[in-house]
Amino acid sequence: MTAAPPPGCPAHASTGLLPLAAATGAPDHREVYRRLRAEWGDVARVELEPGVAAWLVMGYREMLTLTRNEQLFSRDARNWRDLREGVVSPHSGLLPMMGWRANVIGADGPEHRRLRAPLDDGVARIDQRRARRQVEALCEELIAEFAARGSADLVGEYATIVPMLALASLFGLDSAGGHELLRALIALFGSADDSQAGNRQFEEILLDTLRERRARPSDDLTTAFLDHPGLRNEAEHLQSVVVMISAGNETVTAWIAHTLRLLLCDPRFASRLHGGRLGIDDALDEALWRDPPMNNMPARYALRDTELGGHRIRQGDCLILGIAAANDDPLIRPEDELTEPGNRAHLAFSAGPHVCPAQVPARLITRTAVKTVLHRLPGLRLTVPAEEIGWRPSPWTRVPTALPVAFPPAPRPSKENR
């Protein structure tokens, strides 16, 4: 790899394109994607960081082409021309999310299938009834901390904590370890200056857990990965755990937060839910259509020159999966209409060989978290105008910085009633 140009070099100057993080952080991100579509069509040129451009794939049909054709569009970042040629600095905050790792995310073909099998097997062995009870107990404990107060931040005090502690439990980590992982992951997903430090801390915590479980096996997913015949060494064990926890935490946080935000900010939808015409799963799916947990997902890399969405794509070009934009494609989703109940044709979990392997536990955690807070806190209302909700900085995920709410104070339940 050639040396990266120093800061201030013309190679680091802005491309003049829309920064992707500005789209995910916009008050109305769908409107931003609609303007991009009007200017570029279904595939648009955007900026990942100053001097680094990529294609944002926004068309539903183009997205399916991108995700299903691994002979043309690789998941392996070693095919990224800008990374090979030093346009992307080795210190870039993009790399914890976009750099190549020896795991299922960075593999294609038979190697991907080999590394995918342990994840599928791990998900299949989860006792869903037991997991639901554990998540429900966790949610009850968190709500009990603020129920008597009559106010809360449902992101910082709830949606951010539930998935990490639930996942930590599945992998045999205690609450303290779960909170450490959470802090590291928030930095990693931000793709900013502290992203690489967050990534290092995240992997160090999980490596310590793996080595402890090797010495003292337990009934958890960490031990299951250590015992799986499809994983060949410590690096593959580590990266399998990294994928499951990193992909599961931030996305489920976003899913919980967006479902609650939908019910707090859309009276029409909330009335249909409370009137019994819709169920919790309908609310979960509507949130996936409007605000998929990964608004944009990195990445595919063109293995040869081709055409997509009317644009010439060069070998080595980076293509970002514009999931939120594809879900809003006017060819499949009429503007400003509620989705038909039961419609799960969204691309929130991606598509093709790399479709999310953990959809079932993700829905279990999200459904339980939303259902529990609605049951325990009747009369829930947002205490700021919906348009004042801010967003964590990230080009990938769109997570509210806070959801401040008020509700009639509830007595703290006794331990016998929890």
Image (cartoon, rainbow, N blue to C red):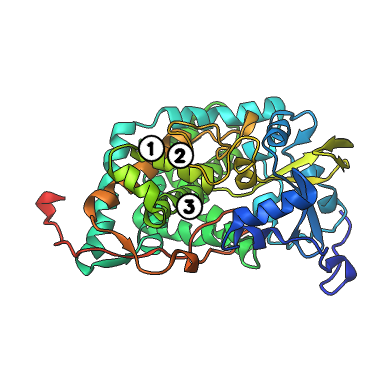
Secondary element at tag 3: helix
Residue type indicated by callout 2:
Asp
In contact (CB < 8 Å): disc 2 and disc 1 = yes
For residue 132, side relative to residue 306 (left or right): left
| Quarter of the view holding residue 364 | top left
Question: Which one is closest to the eye, mark 1 or mark 3?
Answer: 1
* Residue name at image x 54 percent, y 63 percent: 392
Instruction: Tell which of 139 and 398 is nearer to you.
Output: 398
Residue beneath disc 3:
254
- Labels 1 and 3: the sequence-earlier one: 3
Secondary element at tag 1: helix
* Residue name at image x 62 percent, y 33 percent: 354
Residues packed near mark 1 inside 10 Å, few (<14), some (14 to 19) or many (20 plus):
some
Residues packed near mark 3 inside 10 Å, few (<14), some (14 to 19) or many (20 plus):
many
Q: Position of residue 71 (x, y in %)?
A: 78, 28
Residue type indicated by callout 3:
Ala
Report how far apart the C-alphas of labels 2 and 3 lie in the structure.
Answer: 13 Å
For residue 207, side relative to residue 259 (left or right): right
Question: Which one is closest to the eye, mark 2 or mark 3?
Answer: 2
Residue beneath disc 1:
281
Q: Position of residue 31 (x, y in %)?
A: 63, 55
* Residue name at image x 87 percent, y 65 percent: 11
* Residue name at image x 24 percent, y 49 percent: 375
Residue beneath disc 2:
285
